[in-house]
Amino acid sequence: MYSQHRFIDGRPLEMPPGKIVCVGRNYAAHAKELNNPVPEQPLLFIKPASALAALEAPIALPQGKGECHHELEVALLIGSTLSQAKPEDCLAAIAGYGLALDLTLRELQSELKAKGHPWERAKAFDGACPLSAFVPSASVPNWRELRFELHRNGERQQSGHCSDMLFPIDVLLADISQSFTLQPGDIVLTGTPAGVGPLQNGDTLTCQLDKLLSVTTEVQTP
Ligand code: ZN
């Protein structure tokens, strides 16, 4: 059970883990690899707090539901309330930067998309959001320079650069806050770069956020 956000030095954050607002197709190369058009407005969906798990804990894949893909994303920890915000007011509300996996049951998602149904069964299930500890914002002077990578069994599978986001963080947060008030303890996932793919039992994953954060985890389905 994921019960508390933490900074990378282990300090707990006194804010309850809240909803996770996610953006689809925020990197052009990833939209292309799944044959999706690039959106004109951020494509948003939400995972509940019950989807959270610690990134370093073993990942258990849902059984009998088809391929489960890894999507490595930069995660923002919201530290103060944002509602109807302007882009220039948004960066100050970020308490920390971390990494998350937006785990996705891809075959199920394709079925749901084809039927015009919501994606929650494919993206919001228990454990669908493994989440790291957070680097304090003060240690990230320029988020646009952040690079992040996912290595699967020693091979680089995903590599992203935050400057490639179609909707940059300030614009994204402002847009989200027009529909959903962001509260302290909420998380925003900023989209995945190209290179998503299915996880297999026994995989070892290493997730890196520049030189700030590195987490290794394993896929161990009981
Ligand atoms: Zn995603």
Image (cartoon, grey):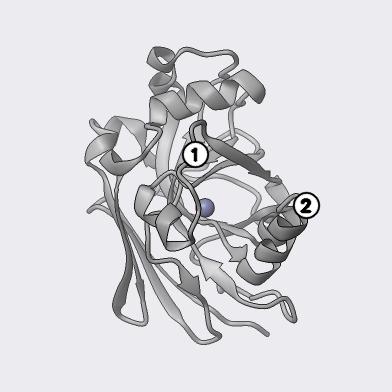
Point out the image quarter for the C terminus: bottom right
Identify which amino acid the numbered label 1 is placed on.
Pro
Indicate left or right for 89 with 50 as reference.
left
What kind of residue is marked 2?
A: His
Q: Please state which of residues 33 and 148 is positioned toward the viewer in this rendering.
A: 33
Q: Residue at x 75, y 49 (%)?
A: 118
Q: Secondary structure at mark 1?
A: loop
Point 40% across, 20% down: residue: 92
Residue 131: x and y, percent?
52, 54
> Tag on residue 117?
2
| Residue located 58% across and 33% down the image | 14
Q: Would residue 144 appear left or right of 200 to someone viewing this image? A: left
Location of residue 43 with respect to 128 vertically, above or below? above
Q: Name the quadrant containing residue 141.
A: top left
- The residue nearer to you, when weighing 49 against 196, is 196
Q: SS for tag 2?
A: loop
Judging depth in this view, the residue of 204 and 190 nearest the camera is 190
Q: Classify mark 1 as within 8 Å of ligand 1 or not, answering yes or no.
A: no
Q: Is residue 50 visible?
A: yes
Q: To which residue does mark 1 refer?
A: 39
Q: Is residue 204 above or below residue 194?
A: below
User: From the viewer's perspective, is 87 left or right of 101?
Assistant: left
Mark 1 / mark 2, whichever is N-terminal: 1
Query: In the image, 50: left or right of 55?
Result: right
Image coordinates of residue 181 in percent, x first then y, are 64, 22
